[in-house]
Image (tube, rainbow, N blue to C red):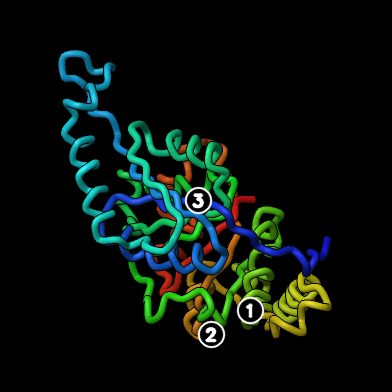
Amino acid sequence: MQVPKANLRLSLKNVLFTTDFTSASVAALPYVTALAGWYGAKIVVVHCVEPEPVLSMPMEPMPQDMDFNWRNAKIKMGEFLRSRPLEGTAHETLVLQGDLWPVLEDVIRRHEIDLIVLGTHGREGIKKLVMGSSAEQIFRRAACPVLTVGPKAIHPSVRFENWKHILFATDFSAGSLGALPYALSLAEENQAALTLLHMISLVPMQREQFVIEAARKRLELLVPLEAAAWCNPEFVVQLGFPTDGILRVAEERGADLIVMGVHTPRSPRASVHLPWAIAHEVVSRSHCPVLTVRG
């Protein structure tokens, strides 16, 4: 297992904030401005409008000047800007038409996006199964990190320098370990405490202690020796279901941020219709924002 370099630093030049103008998006806005302000990054605000088909010709999109949703989106973006939420920060706003992911993928490429920030309604169970999750579609397909603010996140003081405890959850797969450099970088940036967590779902009772100790040693090997001086690492191995364990430890440690890797689904739409996906469940139930990095 390769130990990451401690000098890998997070650098943000362009941050994408995708909004649907609902309360879920509003909750994520302070995180956008806090991160952009700290790193001196430009904010690209995007609202995506799905084209309204012409009834007589279902496959032909309606002209924009006749599309009520398009005109309404332009009005809402104007109202958003009049409230001056991004004052003092370099920014650009875009109202674009098309299916969500192809639109965002193009914006990410053209604007060289380093981080996506979004809010989510956190659909679970049958609602997610039927309607899918826009947030999960984004964080499982974006090549850059995604910071998702869920519906249960508490926002006492949304300032980047107040992120003093970071929880990194891993199952030791290559996909999950891809997020580790970001956890280390953010911990170093803020001189924050870093908890590394591994959850073990099922293990024979007679081998329980052996498996826990082996996992703990693997966690210790993930932190470079020079990093221990500034991130005060804690290594936690517990038995139980991953989602419940991650949320419990985050709550007990008062985590300000959860960092975890996510796997790319084999089918582009598969993950957004799985109600039991771990990353989505953590985002939906977490009391702090979650930074996901696609493996």
Instruction: Bin the neighbour count of mark 1 within 10 Å (Cα to Cα): few under 14, some 14-19, many 20 and up.
Output: many
Q: Secondary structure at mark 1?
A: strand
> Seen from this angle, which residue lies furthest front?
88
Measuring 54% from the left and 45% from the top, which residue is drawn there? 142
Residue 270 placement (x, y as % from top left): 47, 40
Q: Which mark is residue 195?
A: 1
Q: Secondary structure at mark 2?
A: helix
The residue lying toward the viewer, choosing from 236 and 261, is: 261
Going by the numbered disc 1, the residue's amino acid type is Thr
Q: CA distance from mark 1 to mark 2?
A: 8 Å
Mark 1–mark 2 contact, CB under 8 Å?
Answer: yes
Q: Which mark is residue 253?
A: 2
Going by the numbered disc 2, the residue's amino acid type is Arg
Q: Is residue 205 left or right of residue 57?
A: right
> Pointer 3: what residue?
139
The answer to whether 129 is drawn above or below residue 154 in the figure is: above
Sequence-wise, the earlier of marks 3 and 1 is 3
The answer to whether 171 is drawn above or below residue 237 in the figure is: above
Sequence-wise, the earlier of marks 3 and 2 is 3
Measuring 38% from the left and 81% from the top, which residue is drawn there? 156
